[in-house]
Image (cartoon, rainbow, N blue to C red):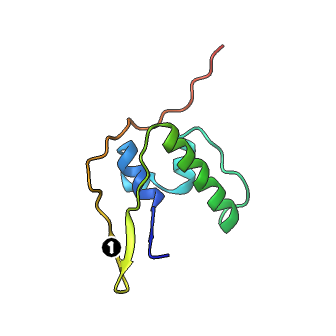
Amino acid sequence: AKKWINIRKSYGNFYKVPRNQTKLTIMLENLGMNYDGRPHSGLDDSKNIARIAIRMLQDGCDLRVNERIHGGQLMTVSSSGPLEGAPAPQMPRYRN
C-alpha cells in the first residue's frame, strides 16, 4: 500500500481531540464501545478500527487518505478542501 487512512489522525482531527486521546482503547471508550477480542491481535485490532471508522462515518466524517509513502518517506496528505469537524464523542445516552 502506498497510501492509506490513518484512523488515529482522522479521529483526532474530526473529534478535535489531542493525539494522546487517539489510542485504540481510548477511542473505543470515548465512543461508548468495548474492545472486542484479544488485545494486540492484528485481526481483532482491525475489526475494532473498522467499528471506529463506521461510527465516524455515521457521525458525518468524510474519511480521506491522509498518509502516503513517497520515495521511501512517510508523508502527510493534505485534504483538497476544508473538512468540518464534530464535537468530541460523548458516551451514548440511554432512554428510559
Viewer-nearest residue: 26 or 44: 44
Q: Is residue 17 visible?
A: no
Farthest residue to the bottom: give it. 71
Neighbours of disc 1 within 10 Å: few (<14), some (14-19), many (20+): few
Residue 51, percent from left and from top: 61, 48
Q: Is residue 11 visible?
A: yes
Residue occupying the point 54% across, 42% down: 55
Count of marks overlaid on the render = 1
Above or below, 62 against 69 in this view is above
Left or right, 5 with respect to 92, comes to left
Dividing the picture into quarters, in which one does residue 61 lie?
top left
Farthest residue to the right: give it. 37
Residue occupying the point 54% across, 40% down: 31
Residue occupying the point 41% across, 61% down: 65
Left or right, 25 with respect to 35, comes to left
Left or right, 56 with respect to 10, comes to right
Q: Which residue carries the number 1 mark?
A: 75
Residue 16, percent from left and from top: 35, 44
Above or below, 19 against 96 in this view is below
Mark 1 element type:
strand
Residue occupying the point 44% across, 38% down: 60
Residue 85, percent from left and from top: 34, 41
Farthest residue to the left: give it. 81
Q: Quadrant of the C terminus?
A: top right
Farthest residue to the front: give it. 80
Residue 15, percent from left and from top: 39, 43
Callout 1, which amino acid?
Answer: Met
Dividing the picture into quarters, in which one does residue 2 lie?
bottom left
Viewer-nearest residue: 68 or 93: 68
Left or right, 19 with respect to 90, comes to left
